[in-house]
Amino acid sequence: QYLTKSVIFGTMEVKTSSNSVRFDKQRCSFIVLIMFFSLPAVNAVWPMPQLISSSTDRYPLSPRQFIFQYASGSSAKSGCSVIDSAFKRYFPLIFVDYLKKTEKHMYRTFSMQPMLNVYASIHLSFPFSVVDKLSVSSGQASLRAKTVWGALRGLESFSQLVYQDDFGQYFVNKTEIDDFPRFKFRGLLLDTSRHYLPLPAILKTLDAMSYNKFNVFHWHIVDDPSFPYQSSTFPGLSSKGAFHPSTHVYSQTDVSRVISHARLRGIRVLPEFDSPGHTQSWGKGQPGLLTSCYKGSVPSGTFGPVNPAMSSSYQFISRLFKEVASVFPDPYIHLGGDEVDFTCWKSNPEVRGFMQKMGFGTDYTKLESYYMENIINLTKTLNKTSIVWQDVFDNHEKVKETVLHIWKGSPAQIQQELSDITLAGYRVILSAPWYINHIAYGQDWTTYYNVQPLNFTGSEQQKSLVIGGEVCMWGEYVDATNLSPRLWPRASAAAERLWSDEKTTSSVTDAFPRLTDFRCRLLRRGIQAEPLFVGHCRHEYEGI
């Protein structure tokens, strides 16, 4: 006979017994029962939950008797792809050795019963709430979450509670967790223009992101060096702009696979098509798009940013973005807008003439603003909200209803930027402290861990406009050969800063053994995470 117990995600009162679970129906919308004959578990969960208490009481787990099961009354039912696939995915993550020994093991069927009415969107909404509670005691663990996305985070937490002794027996300790993320936007950027990343490398990164509870994959898919996105509207962009027209491109099927893989792990896919700068590869497949640079009175044969004086430029962007909006379901799109070099615009007589016609004089930030305002308005017609790099704000451009993305500056400058942007009423994403493509000898993860996103002068209302942060892995020196070890576990430090309470996770000394243990777990799950320092992992070569 199974004993019952709960793992909950939410802020509700819960009373449990061997045969009943009572809860506040107004505050809980989704329950998953994790049932087994007897329970056990351990040390740490990464990122650190908001509240966690555990005891030395431990219970053995038997893979042969363990099942995931929806609780009676759950609003999720058979056919909920997000949770169904998570059940199948987490069994081998929890019981790694078991499936190696029993290749013919079949996953248990899930008994589904209807429960509370709750809305779970087919596509991830922004932002979406994650509130959950997890309880583990003798005979049963229970997970309660307001949404399926919260349930995914709870399953990850539970998977990290399970451990093995020296004889291979699985255990979980008696544990209670109440959890929710500190920030709603917890992103990771991959740059697939400077080096093409094969699809398996992206999918594996999404797996690792889910283990770290990141929820936004910022896909910087194109840039100056190459245009690997295979557009159905403008096929010449990739056939002429990619490093190779057939091997180094992302087809519509590839993109769909990335979006589906991410969604099942509770991750949004945020595409970025950066313009008017960073567009050299665009011009190869779209003649007339870029500004022709002049040397004196004659064209030099080189090209600069998108030509903002030509109506054809906006017609092209409109058609391209209409396609992008249909391919990428996320309600947000990143428009870039950074590092626009005005030199070529200044040299072009047509652009200079347009400047005079518009009354811009010689202030080229006004021309850039004109371009960005047009592009932002265009995205609004597609029911998309724009995200732009901080340069757009710094150049005093009018960018109503956009999210600003901070990517540069010294610590003092970043604090000032946060103050200025939020004082102006804009939402903001912070990336500047988390450019982890920059490497240094030693334990540089501590730098990322010690970031204080809200350490700037401003009111509580201003600080509420900081919706989160993002780790950036730019690709000048990164491809599939070194992506994972350069990302992990360094990005994990940022993951905890974005998820966990800052006061309870302020000690690098306390974090080190937890992160070391988590790095070993990543290795066992097949993520090639680099070591933090001298030492070893018990199963360090199993997943490699």
Image (spheres, rainbow, N blue to C red):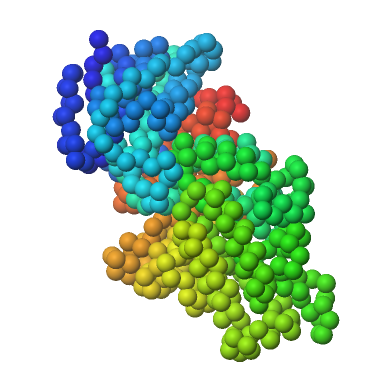
Q: Position of residue 440 (x, y in %)?
A: 59, 53
- Above/below status of 341 relative to 520: below
Q: Position of residue 452 (x, y in %)?
A: 39, 58
The front one of 363 and 539 is 363
Image-quadrant location for residue 422: bottom left
Q: Position of residue 48 (x, y in %)?
A: 36, 41
- Above/below status of 51 relative to 176: below
- Above/below status of 532 relative to 379: above
The front one of 458 and 84 is 84
Q: Residue at x 52, y 51 (%)?
A: 270
Q: Position of residue 89 (x, y in %)?
A: 47, 27
The front one of 293 and 475 is 293
**348 horizontally vs 213: left or right:** right
Q: Residue at x 53, y 24 (%)?
A: 539
Q: How many marks?
A: 0
- Above/below status of 460 relative to 205: below
Q: Quadrant of the C terminus?
A: top right
Residue 195 visible? The answer is: yes
**95 horizontally vs 311: left or right:** left
Q: Residue at x 26, y 40 (%)?
A: 10
Q: Quadrant of the N terminus?
A: top left
Residue 407 visible? The answer is: no
Q: Residue at x 59, y 63 (%)?
A: 318
